[in-house]
Image (cartoon, rainbow, N blue to C red):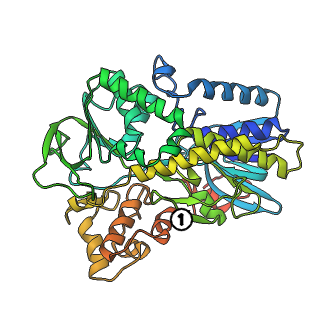
Amino acid sequence: MTTQRVDVAVIGAGPAGLAAALAAAEAGMSVAVVDAGVRPGGQYWRSPAPGAGPFRPAALHHGWTRFTSTDTRLSELADAGRVLRLAGHHVWSVVPAGDQWSVHCVVGVEPRQHGTPAPVTVHARRLVLATGAYDRQLPFPGWDLPGVLTAGGAQALLKGNLVVAGQRVVVAGTGPFLLPVADGLARHGAQVATVVEANSPLAFARFPHTLLGAAGKLGEASGYAGRLLRHRVAVRYRHVVLRALGTDRLTGVVIGRVDRDGRVRAGTERRIDCDALAVGWGFTPQLELALQLGCATRLDVDQSLVVTVDDNQATSVGGVWAAGEATGVGGADLASVEGRIAGLAVAAALGADAVPVDRALRRRRAALRRFATAMHQVHPIPVGVLDECTDETLVCRCEEVRAGEIRRAVVELEATEARIVKLLARPGMGWCQGRVCGFATACLTARHAGRAVAEPDLRAFADRPIAAPTLLGELATPDGDARPDGDRG
């Protein structure tokens, strides 16, 4: 096992992690940037995989210039010995070790295979968690057909492999993220049949002062809308996908209009032929490591479980800071600002003669956070979406748990908490450990129990003692005391 010692370990190399690492390193700290990706940038600034072909970043990434300048500066600091860049390192556990933290990693693109590189442990005096988020999904009849994927999955295929998800694609769900997904697909050869948006942007009129504080967001959205118009992509507001059609593959979708109460209007169904459906209902913050460490959490306005932080991005656990989507989904701009604040605060806590966090940076964060809050209020999940779930609708793909089994666990067996539903019906007990079905199960549990989704419902699927698949040998020797014969189990 290889060990490294630094002042600050930043977990995650997306917008928040890169900003935090740069701020701390420029303040004189030794920094390790630990990320599972083979290249920096996270999901937002995802680069193509090696060998994927020619790359035109300006056509795929908003803010690419900002990313490249940050990445170049970090590379310079790495050459100077101030930054340690650990790509392809999957963090499965973080534990206290005296007055430091031990960050345990397995290494490689597929670290579960035999013969992968030896594990790595990073010992750091302070931690910054910038673990990001992943797609949030809700089930509907046919969502398990080949050809149905998440909106983030379609974007990742395009950015990471330069592959469009299909020839004729429907993009559906809610939130601003649908626009860049549709724009990218249309620009790179797919026919985007339509964008199915469950809400209306006119609701932003309720937040005029918030919009004034985030004028750049309006310009970005206008740019996407203009390009979709040029590609003749229609956006159907206040519509949702009711079901996916097909037998062995997707052949089309049925959409319907929702009223102002979020219920599907009778008689508004319409079929749209397509061979791919990219659907997204926002994002779920990735909190395994924060919950391992005991960081306090709260329920955000978009029904996400997020890490609670103070004005300096410090968590409730001493020596641990958090930034980006883990503290509340708000986009790359907000994540970058939070990351910079966290990096400066960590350096100051370690006694560096650092540049203090100025008021302008805090004001920028406040404005972007207000916009994120407004965005979530404008793009809620309609209450009637789960009405389309029949008892036979698959909810947990790994364990093949259907919606009827969750309903029976609540109604007949009186399992009023998602944790008990998980034990009785086994959703979230399979390969993905609830990353796909956890939010849906929490929503269905609360729905059948006649109440709103609560923090314990989400913690039942977010709290995992092991954050990434690892070998039994690493569990037996987590502190680096490798066996004399070199056998890693």
Question: In the rendering, at what x and y percent does residue 279 appear?
Answer: 32, 44
* Crowd rating for badge 1 (residues with CA inside 10 Å; few <14, some 14–19, many 20+): some
Q: Mark 1 points at which residue?
A: 463
Question: In the rendering, at what x and y percent does residue 30 appear?
Answer: 82, 41
Relative to 399, residue 217 above or below: above
Relative to 139, residue 409 above or below: below
Question: In the rendering, at what x and y percent does residue 477 appear?
Answer: 69, 59
Q: Where, by quadrant of the figure, is residue 343 drawn?
A: top right
Quarter of the picture holding the C terminus: bottom right
Q: Which residue is more in the foreground, 393 or 268?
A: 268
Q: How many numbered discs sit on the rendered protein? A: 1
Q: Is 286 left or right of 247, judged from the image as shown?
A: right
Q: Which residue is more in the foreground, 460 or 371?
A: 371
Residue pictured at 72% horizontal, 47% vertical: 342
User: Helix or strand or loop: what does disc 1 sit on?
Assistant: loop
Q: Which residue is more in the foreground, 107 or 281?
A: 281
Q: Is 173 left or right of 360, judged from the image as shown?
A: left
Q: Is 350 left or right of 412, judged from the image as shown?
A: right
Instruction: Examine the rendering and report whether any part of residue 483 can be seen.
Output: no
Residue pictured at 62% horizontal, 48% vertical: 366
